[in-house]
Amino acid sequence: MNAKELFEKIQEKRSFLCVGLDSEFAKIPEFLKREQHPVFEFNKRIIDATAPYTVAYKPNIAFYEAFGVAGWVNLRLTVDYLNEHYPDMFLIADAKRGDIGNTSRMYAKAFFDTIGFDAVTVAPYMGEDSVKPFIGYKDKWAIILALTSNTGAINFQYTEDKFSGLMLFEKIIAQSKNWGTSDNTMYVVGANRVEMLTEVRKLVPDHFLLIPGVGAQGGNLSEIAQAGLNSQCGLLVNASRSIIFADNTEEFATIAAQKAAEVQQEMAYLLIEKGLIQP
């Protein structure tokens, strides 16, 4: 999926919502824990309930890796289910990989070829050769960590380079935007960093941005849209806990659908306001 196709899907769904499948075993409803593959069963019901309102899903790989082989089986079943039943969804592996050389190539192969994701989050600290293997695949994406939402981001990301005058996150974007194109690279910018989103847009006016932190982490969707929307939307806004764990009874999927629909309705209004879709 390239940027044009992603925008067309956003227009069709009237949504730029990404649902994060941070499916922590301890938090899924008790009645599902008796299933052979409980996390997959949880994910499947969340997916079926929220698919009308979203354009992307983003499993956080840590919640699967933590359970070894069983966790990887649940992840593979989830991705296979999405690719079979919702082949037009944009699938992001939130893996935050960041190695070089053959190791980086093997990470790309694992998530793109073996499992079947469309995109992988990548830490660029080791430079160009930690990102390039991910953008060597046709219609696949590297999503580069730029400005994250955690409190520790201030430790390094806002450090100013005395030669260029750029903060570290700005330097990462300024250099890495030349490694690929707006069809195969996007950037992570935390929803609670909205005050810097305008500066990010100046550096990458045409790229998509993945914005985590809406919902449980308190990001303001209207402010994000005002600062971040471009002529092809250019945003994927992620919500995880506020949707998938909104309820832990047997009605959890119904409640998740309601929460996703609420976000989608606000997104539709913002897209109309920007002139990107018709009322």
Image (cartoon, rainbow, N blue to C red):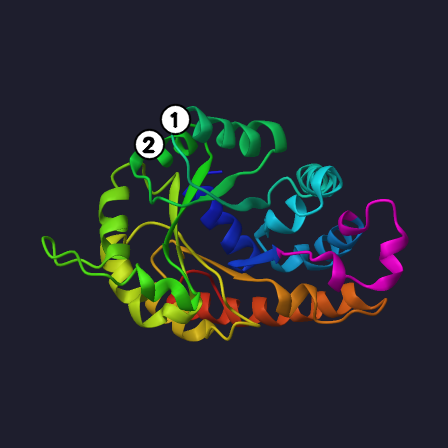
Position of residue 191 measured from the top left corner of the image (x, y, whole percent): 43, 67
Q: Residue furthest top?
A: 102
Position of residue 274 measured from the top left corner of the image (x, y, whole percent): 38, 67
27 magenta-colored: yes
Crowding at label 2, few (<14), some or many (≥20) Cα neighbours within 10 Å? some
CB under 8 Å between discs 2 and 1: yes
Residue that carries the numbered disc 1 in the rendered image: 101
Task: Note whether 5 is above or below 274 in the view shown.
Answer: above
Task: Note whether 55 is above or below 98 in the view shown.
Answer: below
Per the model, the C-alpha gap separating discs 2 and 1 is 7 Å
Residue that carries the numbered disc 2 in the rendered image: 129
Identify the element where label 1 is drawn.
Answer: helix
Q: Is residue 177 visible?
A: no
* Residue type marked 2: Asp
> Which residue occupies 76% across, 40% down?
70
Task: Note whether 95 is above or below 254 in the view shown.
Answer: above
Say whether disc 2 or disc 1 marks the residue closer to the N-terminus. 1
Q: Tell me where residue 112 sits by quadrant.
A: top right
Q: Tell me where residue 175 sits by quadrant.
A: top left
**Horizontal arrangement in the rendering, residue 108 relative to residue 82 (left or right):** left
* Residue type marked 1: Gly
Identify the element where label 2 is drawn.
Answer: helix
226 magenta-colored: no
- Where residue 76 is drawn, which disc sits there? none
> Which residue occupies 68% across, 56% down?
23
**Horizontal arrangement in the rendering, residue 187 relative to residue 175 (left or right):** right
Position of residue 197 measured from the top left corner of the image (x, y, whole percent): 32, 65
Judge by depth and name the residue closer to the eye, 67 or 270. Answer: 67
